[in-house]
Image (spheres, helix red, strand yellow):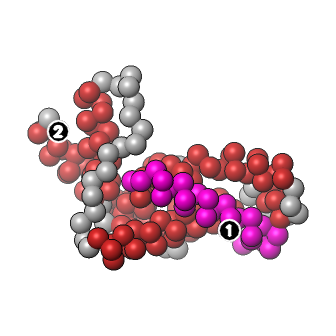
Amino acid sequence: MDDQDPDSILIERVGRGETAATRMLVTAKLPRILGLATRMLRDTAEAEDVAQETFVRVWRHAAAWQPGRARFDTWLHTVVLNLCRDRLRRRREVTGDAMPDLPDPTPDAEAGLLEQERGRAVSKAVAALPERQREAILLVHYQELSGGEAAKALEISVDALESLLARGRRTLRAQLATREDEI
């Protein structure tokens, strides 16, 4: 048993077909999976489809899960990333290079107008990053994965991840500074 992976026991139980364990896993992981998929796809309905596909894969592979090879959470984020990448690729094939700018589906009525504008500017700036930089930023800053976990999910070294993060942050700072001047 892998003592370092907090999900090992739960995955074993899901693999044995325990309904309660499956419910617990979905309850624990769904918000983060939906958050990542929504940020990547900028479409709530597609993000929900990705989450559903992800849990179907978990259910199918849980019995064969081998603790110690990778943390379950890292594998789960890799699945979500790959499903999102596939959908984004299909969109580009259908619509060409330009993707429509979709509004943020979760308006915050209590936040001030300036804060909403800043949030949209950040979302837009993150969405405009090159794919790998965007994925690194989302995994580390929004999904709160450690550098090692994010690097594994992206199948790159920690040094390569740090490089992506540094370039992404630099680009975001420049884009947001320009937008602040406009506001």
Q: Work out whether 49 lies above or below 89.
A: above
Q: Is residue 82 above or below residue 171?
A: below
Could you tell me which residue is drawn at 39 percent across and 53 percent down?
A: 42
- Camera sees residue 74: no
Q: Give the camera-side residue of 118 and 42.
A: 42
Q: How many marks?
A: 2
Few, some or many residues within 10 Å of mark 2 (<14, 14–19, 20+): few
Q: Residue 131 location in percent, x, y?
A: 36, 67
Residue 57 marker: 1
Q: Residue furthest bottom?
A: 93
Q: Is residue 51 magenta?
A: yes
Name the front one of labels 2 and 1: 1
Determine which quarter of the picture holds residue 14. Answer: bottom right
Residue 2: image x %, image y %? 80, 62
Please provide percent x and percent y for residue 60.
Answer: 74, 70
In this picture, which residue range is highlighted in magenta? 42-70
Image quadrant where one finds the N terminus:
bottom right
Q: Is residue 37 left or right of residue 129?
A: right
Work out which quarter of the rendered image holds the C terminus and state it.
top left
> Residue at coordinates 20% horizontally, 51% vertically from top-left?
174
Q: Residue furthest left?
A: 182
Kindly identify the amino acid type of the residue bearing the numbered disc 1: Arg
Residue matched to label 2: 180
Count residues near mark 1 (Cα–Cα under 10 Å), then give few for <14, some for 14-19, many for 20+: few
| Percent of width and height locating residue 84 | 47, 65
Amino acid type for the residue under numbered disc 2 = Glu
- Residue located 26% across and 73% down the image: 96
In whole angstroms, how far apart are the C-alphas of marks 2 and 1? 43 Å
Residue 73, picture quadrant: bottom right
